[in-house]
Image: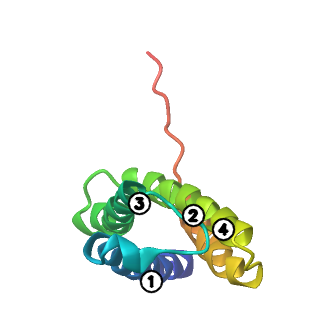
Amino acid sequence: MKKNVTLWIVQGLLAALFLFAGVMKLVLPIEAMAGPIALPGLFLRFIGVVEVLGAGGLILPGLLRIHAELTPLAAAGLVIIMIGATVITAMGGASAAAVGPLVIGLLAATVACGRWRPVQVVRA
């Protein structure tokens, strides 16, 4: 029970974070999102869409009790996004700033592992 509550808290916080970050990537002008390493504008918009969808995937399946197996998949997808963010941030010369995306990725990995349920095969 305590594990479930903790996972829901982490999922809620991650969903809020990724929803905010994703919407900002979709709303802000491309020039305003320039970082130490130049990324194509369409790629940044794609990441924004993925973050918004990932935020929904963290919350909606469990909340609506429909296809709960999508939550660990959404979390795993966000782990991939955060691995990229960590690498890009570190390549930009800000090694200390790369700790933020790393921690967020580890939290998403915790959700992915915590919500993972192996499929039981029924044999005839």
User: Does dot 2 land on a helix, a strand or a loop?
Assistant: helix
Amino acid type at mark 3: Ile
Spot occupied by residue 95 in the image (x, y as percentages of width and height)? 77, 78
Packing grade of label 1 (10 A; few <14, some 14-19, many >=20) is some
- Of the pair 77 and 28, the residue shown nearer to us: 28
Tell me the element at label 4: helix
Looking at numbered disc 2 in the image, what kind of residue is underneath it?
A: Gly
Residue 22 visible to the viewer = no
Front residue of this view, candidates 12 and 123: 12
Left or right: 62, with 123 as reference point: left
Nearest to N terminus: mark 4 or mark 3? 3
Give whichever of 40, 79 is nearer the camera.
Answer: 40
Residue 13 numbered tag: 1
State the residue position of label 4: 86
Q: Which residue is mark 2?
A: 114
Residue 84, x across and y down, in percent: 61, 59
Q: Considering the numbered disc 1 on the image, is that residue within a helix, a strand or a loop? A: helix
Question: In which image quadrant can residue 56 be found?
Answer: bottom left
Residue that appears at 28% across and 70% down:
26
SS at mark 3 in the image: helix
Which quarter of the rendering shows the C terminus? top left
What whole-number distance in Å separates the C-alpha atoms at marks 4 and 2? 22 Å
| Residue at 53 percent of width and 60 percent of height | 81
User: Who is closer to the viewer here, 104 or 60?
Assistant: 104
**Residue sitting at x 54%, y 66%:** 111
Residue at the (35%, 70%) spot, across then down: 30
Circles 4, 3 touching at the beta carbon (< 8 Å)? no
